[in-house]
Image (spheres, rainbow, N blue to C red):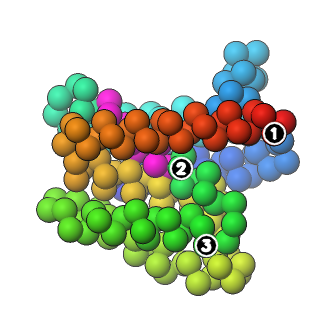
Amino acid sequence: GALTVAAAAACGAYDDFAGAGDPRRGFRAHLGALRRGEVTSGAVKLIGIGAAACAAGAVVKERPLDKALAAVVIAGSAHLVNLLDVRPGRAAGAVLALAAPGLARRGSAPLAAAPMGAAAALIADDVAERTMLGDTGSHALGAGLGLAVAVGNGRAGLALHAAALVGTALAMDARNHLCE
């Protein structure tokens, strides 16, 4: 779990520094660049966080489909929290709200408490604009949240979470594409 969060943070940090000033946003833009042979910082995030999520899914679930769904939930949660990090306090507030139900789930409570505690510790400074999550923090919080969701849910819950996360990612990518 900690390695997944660290990998998500590292990929986010790479994007924070290497991707600064790159106007491309969304899967479509980064995958298009990758098809043309250009490795963008967004593609590094997509591949790196995806690989870390696959590894985590393989550890926390037993059946192949559950492993795949867990990977989608972990990577998708990292992406969702990053998408929300456009206004001070929005991403951290979302993590607080979304992690709270995990505290009541046996087995996932400690995993839900980690991103929730981190978000609680930094939200005041984030709202006051003294600090900023950036891709580093938002991907780490999201991966931690996704890991808690993956551990705390069976196949049906994983499938519902995965569908919601994929749908949100596709909708946001379409929105970004329309705004270009």
Counting residues from the N terminus, which is met first, the one under dot 3 or under dot 1?
A: 3
Q: Which residue is mark 2?
A: 80
Residue 168, image x, y percentages: 53, 41
Name the residue rendered at 49%, 80% in the picture: 121
Residue 74 part of the magenta segment: yes
Q: Secondary structure at mark 1?
A: helix
- Foreground: 54 or 142? 142
For residue 123, above or below residue 136: below
Left or right: 2 as drawn, with respect to 16: left
Q: Quadrant of residue 9?
A: bottom right
Q: Is residue 168 in view?
A: yes
Residue 82, image x, y percentages: 59, 53
Magenta segment boundaries in residue numbering:
68-78
- Foreground: 176 or 19? 176
Residue 155, image x, y percentages: 21, 37
Left or right: 120 as drawn, with respect to 147: right
Mark 3 touches mark 2? (CB < 8 Å) = no
Between the C-alphas of marks 2 and 1, the distance is: 19 Å
Closer to the eye: label 3 or 1:
1
Q: Which residue is mark 3?
A: 89
Closer to the eye: label 2 or 1:
1
